[in-house]
Amino acid sequence: MNKRTFCTAALVLLTPASLFSQELEGALLLHQQSLDMIWLLLAAVLVFFMQAGFTLVESGLTRAKNAGNILMKNLMDFSAGAIIYWAFGWALMYGASASGMIGTSEFFIAGATPELFSDWMFQVVFAATAATIVSGAMAERTRFSSYLIYSIFITGLIYPVSGHWIWGDGWLASLGFHDFAGSTVVHSVGGWAALMGALVLGPRIGKYIRHNGEVSVKAIPGHNLPLAGAGVFILWFGWYGFNAGSTLSGTDLSASHIAVTTTLGAAAGAIGAMAVTWKRYGKPDVSMSFNGALAGLVGITANCDVISPAGSIVIGLAAGFLVVYSVEFLDKVLHIDDPVGAVSVHGVCGVWGTLAAGLFHTESGLLYGGGASLLAIQALGAASVFAWVTATSGILFLTIKKTVGLRVSQEDEFKGLDISEHGLEAYSGFQIFSNM
């Protein structure tokens, strides 16, 4: 043994075991933090890619003359929303809580660490998702400048406040409200804001025709089902970042369980919607079946971590049934014009997913012998968020309507928003115009 080897061996033997233990713990902690950061950033990228999915779904289910406008709204939902969420949204949602109602610190994500940056990145894509849900329900007749005002407010105020109640150690969190990945926090917020936007805005020209005291409902088909279908597959793909990513840890083994329940819920939703339309219309409806898959995904989002695979199939199947009847009720009974079914998919099925946690939770759900306590808390949370969002977004849309104006002129609506709002054609040289 040479002198250097001997000295090294002696140093190892004389070094206290506690020092080795501390160094090992430090290395393991750094490894854990690195894995968590990689996991969060990867999940954030998947959820960000959902913006492309929403863009394709919305443009495919609406008319060609408005496709460019849809692209711009989805682009600005994220672009403007990211800056506002950096400045205000994060602080209101995750800052130090004031009586469990609102965050009060970390504006402009002050004092940020690498861990905080990764957390912010994961959360900003969720905020953008809530904002972009509204785009489809208000499609084909909304002024672009007015839509930008709305988008800023939902990302900077409406979404963060109710999000704080649930994910920011707010009053609903203290009650035990369970919304793992956002059936209420994200989807119901977007869905109920979409409802108020569609109500204040009014239907597209020619959608509801009144004659002799009766209302005739006219279908206005989208221009490209393949685009819409591709968008749904992109959304389904991104949803694995949405749900499994919400473990917030790269070493949380429950991510595999969550991926399974997410997959089964979406699959059952598509099958459920297909079955209902096949029965009611005589043929399986393509666009409604795709919306069924999205309904299943929304329905499974709150509860994907606490239900069994069998439970996820039941929840998804019910969401597929529910979305069909909800779309028909809003359209044919209430005469609310929602071109892509956003209110039904995200608002109605978001509530269903929230309540389903109280029913199918394998430890405390009503159907598993856990009593009605969790179900009551879930109902309270869903109702509270509904009240907050409908009130604030309703006031916002009415204020915009009375001041700068919310809706384009009849002439511009006939012409199409691509030309009237942006001075271009999404399909230059191939555009087919229709007055209805």
Image (spheres, grey):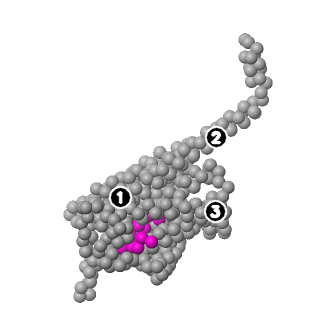
Mark 2 burial class by Cα count in 10 Å: few <14, some 14-19, many 20+: few
Work out how far the residue at label 1 is from the one at label 2, CA to CA, in angstroms: 40 Å
| Residue 140 magenta-highlighted | yes
- Relative to 246, say whether 66 is above or below: below
- Relative to 203, say whether 341 is above or below: above
Residue 30 shows which numbered tag? 2
Work out how far the residue at label 3 is from the one at label 2, CA to CA, in angstroms: 27 Å
Q: Quadrant of residue 192?
A: bottom left
In primary-sequence order, the first of circles 1 and 2 is 2
The region drawn magenta spans 131-145
Residue under label 1:
56
In primary-sequence order, the first of circles 3 and 1 is 1
Q: Secondary structure at mark 2?
A: helix
The amino acid type, in three-letter code, at marker 1 is Leu
Seen from the viewer's position, the closer of residues 155 and 275 is 155
Quadrant position of the N terminus in the picture: top right
Seen from the viewer's position, the closer of residues 234 and 413 is 413
Marks 3 and 1 in Cβ contact (< 8 Å): no
Seen from the viewer's position, the closer of residues 373 and 425 is 425
Residue 75 shows which numbered tag? none
Residue under label 3:
107
Work out how far the residue at label 3 is from the one at label 1, CA to CA, in angstroms: 34 Å
Q: Residue furthest left?
A: 282
323 to the left or right of 87: left
5 to the left or right of 173: right
Whether residue 315 appears in this view of the structure is no
The image position of residue 98, as x and y in percent, is: 67, 68
Marks 1 and 2 in Cβ contact (< 8 Å): no
The amino acid type, in three-letter code, at marker 3 is Phe
